[in-house]
Amino acid sequence: MWPASSEYQGSQGARLTTAVSFLALMVFVAGLCLQPIAESDLFFRVKVGQEILAHHALMGRNLFSFTAPDYPDLDLAWGFEVGAALLYRLGGFPAIVVGKTAIILAAFALAYVLCRRAGAGAAAAAATLAGAAFVMRERFVERPHVVSFVGEATVLLALAAVGPRWSLRRTLAFAAGMVLWANAHAGIFAGVLMALAAAAASLLCAAAAEPVQRRSELARVQAFALLAAGIALFASATPVGWGIVRYLALHVSLPRLHAIDEFRSATWRSDALFFGWLALAALVTVAALRRGISPLRDALAALSPRLGAAVIMAVLGLWSVRFSADAALVAAPLLATGLTALLARAPVPRTARAALVAGALLLAALAPRIADARAGRPFLSLDLEPDLIPRDAIQFVTAHGLRERMYNDFETGSYLAFEGYPRYRVFVDPRLPAYPPELHRLLGDFDMDRPRWDAAMESYGVTSALLAYAGVNRRVAWWDPDRWALLYRAHDARVFVRRLPRWRSLIARYELPATFSFTVEEGAATLPLATRPLASPVVECEWQRRLGDLFLELDGGGAARAMPAYQRALASPGCLAPQDEATLAGWLGAAALQAKDFERCVTLTGRALALQPGDVATRSNRAAAYEALGRLSAAADDWARVGSDSSEPAVARAATARAQRLRSGSP
């Protein structure tokens, strides 16, 4: 094949180069990991861990939900959840970010060791693994799958070490690692597939080998098959036991009922970087094999375990994007060793290459942090993303007692369970296998109409709803305003409540005159309700006032649609609350003044001042209208009152002077 790197052996005194390259890689990967938390699943993970620590047992049933409280909850990540809960107890969410970073760094440290043992140079190993980290960065989140990165790197090391030198100590260490993996994430099945793929690749090599070599190749096939069997056995060493099979089967069947983005197949449009990474690994490996110093058959035999593992993980990543990061990591050692072979005759010395790569990685990791610090932002921010949780909407529903039977989306349900259980239970949360197929069918039906959705909500006893990500949430359009009142519309969150007698006063206070539509092309759109629903307790004048406010907001301050609604709101004097009537009459009076309709301005501002005599702005508008109408005495009286009421000295002096000039007959 190609010669092993002498750097790893230290024969050329390159240990410092290796250390610097490794350190730069660790800093670069840590920079990708040490970010604000944007993963909503973390909340229920912490809560489950807290419950396990409190009761010294797995939950077993879906206790967080009122929709399926007795449905079995197969928990294959309890170890991760307990660890997350302990870290949260120690230092809150930042401690969990640090813990996640440590796990991912461990995976890349093992992968670096594997690359170097396989013959990759320090620079090639660091650069390739940094590239893999960049491809994987969206999966560097606080979820159990990060443990699988460590497990997959461990399996790759085991595949390279299987043989006569495989000792009892290695066996025990490997077994302990696999048991930890099994109890932290169900992704251990990938280890079984990797070992089986290595066995299959070695079997193909054995079929093509010379008779003398065939026996050793068949021995490797047997060793890899035993390794796969061992990993499969370790996968059952959990409280769930062989329930892992049902758990994995659910992850295959549920996406057919309920489309979920991370279960989709990879596509060129959405996952071009992943496709490019696989193509680069394949091209470099083929090119290196063609330039190798060993016969192709021998080179393939040496590569077969890693090649088989990389191929099966690539297939898995193409089938479901949730495994694309795993595939990128497993392919990295092939790419690193291939690059080392292709650059073996490059004129740039190895130490210079390593220094260049290390410098680039350190610059990429630290430059954005330094720029943030210079701009007054934190060098490190490890808490929650500001918009991850609809905090204001949650405070609203909690303050008004709307959480007992409240619909919520998956992502919001995670935080609601974390923050509210056991006092409150959720409609649904991201623990997909903990919910029955009929609920997944309901949530996966995107051709839903309002009557069917309302019937479904009634069957679950839902009396309120909190929807997040409302701009792209198609379910926001399914709440019929004749049966559901919109109470909250802010910060990309919406709150609805069923029109029940017990909510009548709450609806009268907060109902907004709107419903929603949804199209794939445009997302959700707000539709003002000019006609008040018959069941609404909001009086007509107040409905029209709120409608005008909504028009004003939707039109960016334009008054063309708001003006008629405001005029209808003022049609019956005394209908609105005095403050609202005064504010609205004053606003319309200002608009009339701007339109030079001075008589109307005097009428409207007079109505406002009868309710709020001390409104300086409204009185100033009426004074200006009086002047335009030639009613100078009335204008002088208003300017004098502005002079006495204004809290701004400059305004008071100008108004007083204006009143004096008008009374003296000066223009």
Image (tube, helix red, strand yellow):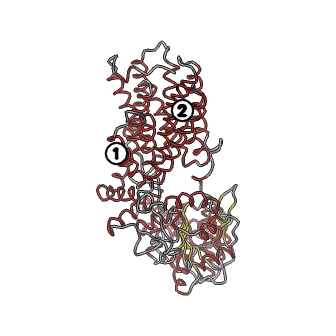
Task: Name the residue type under label 2.
Answer: Ser
Q: Nearer the viewer, residue 656 or 119?
A: 119
Please, what is the three-letter code of the amino acid marked with disc 1? Leu
Quadrant in which the C terminus appears: bottom right
Q: Does residue 93 lie above or below 213 as drawn?
A: below
Q: What numbered label is drawn on residue 172?
A: 1
Residue ID at (65%, 41%): 268
Does residue 238 lie above or below 10 as drawn?
A: below
Element class at badge 1: helix
Q: Residue furthest top?
A: 347
| Residue 222 placement (x, y as % from top left) | 50, 39
In the foreground, 314 or 633: 314
Residue under the image location 42 percent in, 34 percent down: 163
- Reading the image, the residue beneath label 2 is 304
Q: Position of residue 574 (x, y in %)?
A: 57, 84
Horizontal relation, residue 647 to residue 468: left or right: left
Q: Position of residue 327 (x, y in %)?
A: 53, 41
> Quarter of the image holding residue 159?
top left
- Front-most of residues 604 and 534: 534
Residue 236 screen position, x and y as percent: 44, 57
Checking the image for residue 253, the label placed there is none
User: Residue 313 falls in which quadrant of the image?
Assistant: top right
Callout 1: few (<14), some (14-19), or many (20+) C-alpha neighbours within 10 Å? few
